[in-house]
Image (cartoon, rainbow, N blue to C red):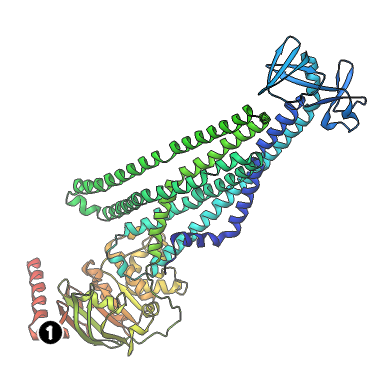
Amino acid sequence: MKESTGKRLFRYAMLYKRTIFIALAMLTVAVVTELSGPFIAKKIIDDHMMGIENPWVEVETEDEKTVSYRGSLYKRSEFASEHEQQNQPLQLVQVGLSFYAINEHLGFDGNRIIDGNTLTVTMGDETAQYEATRLSQQELFAFYKPEIGPIVWLLAFYVGLLVIAAFFQYGKSLLLQSAANRIIQKMRTDVFEHIQGVPITYFDNRPAGKIVSRVTNDTEAIRELFVKVLATFFTSSIYMSAIFVALFLLDTTLATITLLLVPIMVVWVILYRKFASNYNHLIRSRVSDMNGMINESIQGMPIIRAFRRKTQISKEFETLNEEHFTYQNKLLHLNSITSHNLVFVLRNLAFVALIWHFGGQSIGMTAAVSIGMLYAFIDYLGRLFQPVTDIVNQLSQLEQARVASIRVFELLDEKAEEVNEQPIARYDGNVRFNHVSFSYDGKHDVLKDISFEAKKGETVALVGHTGSGKSSIINLLFRYYDIERGEITIDGRSTREMPRQQLRRHMGIVLQDPFLFSGTISSNVSLDNPAISEEQIRKALRDVGAEAFIKQLPNQIEEPVLEKGSTLSAGQRQLISFARALAYDPAILILDEATANIDTETEAMIQHALNIVKEGRTTFVIAHRLSTIRNADQILVLDKGEVVERGSHEELLNQKGTYYRMYQLQQGKQSVKIS
């Protein structure tokens, strides 16, 4: 049973769990310190700024908490001793912008009205009147003076907490992004290594650009998942949890009402993913299609220009581009509907609940809500919707990353060839095909009952028209594909019993269109195999006759090679390809029309070199130019997947069959050219 995409992503994340857990711990500390602000503000407002309205009592001893008022010392009753609390009372009352002093404590609080020196307090049906004295600015400041020190200390404490929060936020971001980059580095390595191991059949019907898109674009989208999306979700979840804890500490009823946001958000995410998933699949698919087309167009640029296909290719690309734009637009509309608008509505509903709840307390029979409490609640509610907005804004990126993850894991789920590094002794190279039939699609045979034997040191040539099955025989020999009917053996051992990597270890191949990698001539011969020394590289180049042109290069064997060897001629690239095959000292050497693109002089040079190096090796030659296989020990003539003739060059000419006609046709063409 396949693991879910989420579990597989989680498994990758757990490779760097230590870094992630440290980052989350730092995030928690940062959130707690940052969210302490409203509590500190509440304390400053209620205990110090509005605290002067608390009851005061007259005292005899002066200290930092006492206030001198009209010849007497007063202290807030909560700071006075039990004995002092029985002394002459005093209370400050704010009406409008002015403060008044009354010589008794308020029995209850409510609506305050001042008329001359009379203060009237009304709450419901109850009314009380007090004689009040208006305070001057100096007298009011005297009552505030003991509170300045604690306010400054609390503000300094909060600034310190903000500095700590900033440090931990920085550490959290650094560690989370570092872990995300490591995760994607590991994932890209896994994908690239897996590509090296998937069967050749995987690449038959898949453009290179689409595969490249999965290794680069899709993994980059997953990187954004770890760097932005999951970081945002973690941060927002911790923020919201801490805010809910703070809200419950302030007021249980309203905090319970705000908890309704959680199920609303869960439903919201589920509905969004349901509609966005299809669009994101189509968008990623079109990106892959465009990458594939761009890659194909770049490789085929000479043909496009030679046959004036620029307009047609541009139209095809524009069709894909337009489809990509259309789906992006639909996703944009979905994001617009389900993003800030809904957050705005939820926030307003929360504030309505706040006004209704606290307003009801204020006009009811209970005590009025303190200003500090109201401020703290409004502050926390405002902060609560920032992480909600952050989560909503990342939903689109989350869905894109999820789709990209599915595409990447689909590639990783492709069954790879088993890797077997167990060394195997160099075989002699006796090859036997015994009644081999093969089909690529399982329906139409491209090889039909093929039987032949190639002994050690022999050269076997395969000739025939295009589609006759020559390359298919080589593909089966390399085990790029496995046969279902017949048997292929090397030194009497079935190739099915031999691990693919070890089977190919003692084989070399030279293609009609040689492929050179970016690097140097030396690295292209050895393919950076440490087992191949510089002397072996030079000898291989010397044996194939490449030494002459290499000596003329500024850096000789260390001469840089651009992609595909574009700075070298076709003949030079082929010589390097020959040297590569020979440097690996294969027991079986395959030449797949290797001399097709080489001039006559270079071909003669290679033929001379091959006559030397093929001794002790079994050599298979696929050739259209029959003049190059005169000395082959055995020539197999193929037609529609069957061996129709076999023998030496002279024997086949004497048969005057298919080979004879092909040879005469080529000789005739040459005669025309000569004349």
Where on the picture, by quarter, is residue 586?
bottom left
Q: Position of residue 631 (x, y in %)?
A: 21, 82
Q: Residue at x 19, y 48 (%)?
A: 312
Residue type at mark 1 is: Leu
Front residue of 403 and 74: 74
Q: Classify 10 Å Cα crowding around label 1: few (below 14), some (14-19), many (20 and above).
A: many
Most extreme residue toward the top is 116
Element at badge 1? helix
Label 1, on which residue? 652
Tell me if residue 514 comes above or below residue 508 in the rendering: above
Q: Does 276 sit left or right of 431 as displayed? A: right
Tell me if residue 653 comes above or below residue 255 in the rendering: below
Q: Position of residue 253 (x, y in %)?
A: 60, 40
Most extreme residue toward the bottom is 492
Quadrant showing the N terminus: bottom left
Q: Position of residue 552 (x, y in %)?
A: 36, 62
Q: Residue at x 44, y 68 (%)?
A: 528
**Residue 522 in view in this figure:** no
**Residue 164 in view in this figure:** yes
Where on the picture, by quarter, is residue 584?
bottom left
Tell me if residue 516 comes above or below residue 32 in the rendering: below
Front residue of 251 and 271: 251
Most extreme residue toward the right is 60
Quadrant showing the C terminus: bottom left
Q: Position of residue 392 (x, y in %)?
A: 46, 43
Q: Residue at x 51, y 43 (%)?
A: 261
